[in-house]
Every structure is written in C-alpha cells, then in structure tokens.
Amino acid sequence: MFEITGFDTAGVVNLKRESLAAALKKARELIQDGCRDVQIVDPNGRVYTSFEEQAA
C-alpha cells in the first residue's frame, strides 16, 4: 500500500492507494484542492514529494 499524507484546513489527510499511479493521481488532486505538505510513502519507506511542482 502507498500512503498519501498532507494537511488541509481541517487537519491531517491520510489516504492509501494500491498502486503508485493511483497514489500520484490522488496526491495531485489533493494539492489542487489546497492541501499542503503532501507526500507519498511507498511500502519500502521511500518518500515521494517531487510531484508537487507537477500539479501546480
């Protein structure tokens, strides 16, 4: 499972997706909706954050 985390006006957002492609799609959607500090952590512990610039 890929974990997507971020912060919005209500607090912490924590979601899970089965694939990296699905996690990237959801992360970009969260950023477009105004979430900040969005990141993805893969099953091996690798952290993805570089997609933030792509979503802007």
Image (cartoon, helix red, strand yellow):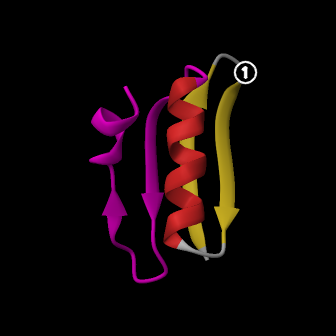
User: Which residue appears at 33% of the width and 71% of the height?
Assistant: 46
Answer whether residue 34 is magenta in the image: yes
User: Which residue appears at 27% of the width and 47% of the height?
Assistant: 50
Q: Position of residue 2 (x, y in %)?
A: 56, 70
Q: Is residue 11 above or below residue 19?
A: above
In the rendered structure, which segment of residues is drawn in magenta? Answer: 33-56
Confirm whether residue 38 shows in the render.
yes
Judged left or right of residue 52, residue 24 is: right
Q: Is residue 55 above or below residue 20?
A: above
- In what element is the residue under mark 1? loop
Q: Position of residue 49 (x, y in %)?
A: 32, 49
Q: Position of residue 1 (x, y in %)?
A: 61, 77
User: Which residue appears at 55% of the width and 51% of the height?
Assistant: 25
Number of numbered discs: 1
Q: Is residue 56 above or below residue 21?
A: above
Q: Is residue 39 above or below residue 1?
A: above
Position of the C terminus, as image quadrant, is top left
Q: Residue furthest bottom?
A: 44
Judged left or right of residue 25, residue 40 is: left
Residue picked out by circle 1: 10
Confirm whether residue 35 shows in the render.
no
Q: Residue furthest right?
A: 10
User: Which residue appears at 40% of the width and 83% of the height?
Assistant: 44
What is the crowding at mark 1: few (fewer than 14 residues within 10 Å), some, or many (at least 20)?
few
Answer whether residue 53 is magenta in the image: yes
Q: Nearer the viewer, residue 4 or 52?
A: 52
Q: Position of residue 22 (x, y in %)?
A: 60, 63
Judged left or right of residue 23, residue 45 is: left
Amino acid at the residue labelled 1: Ala
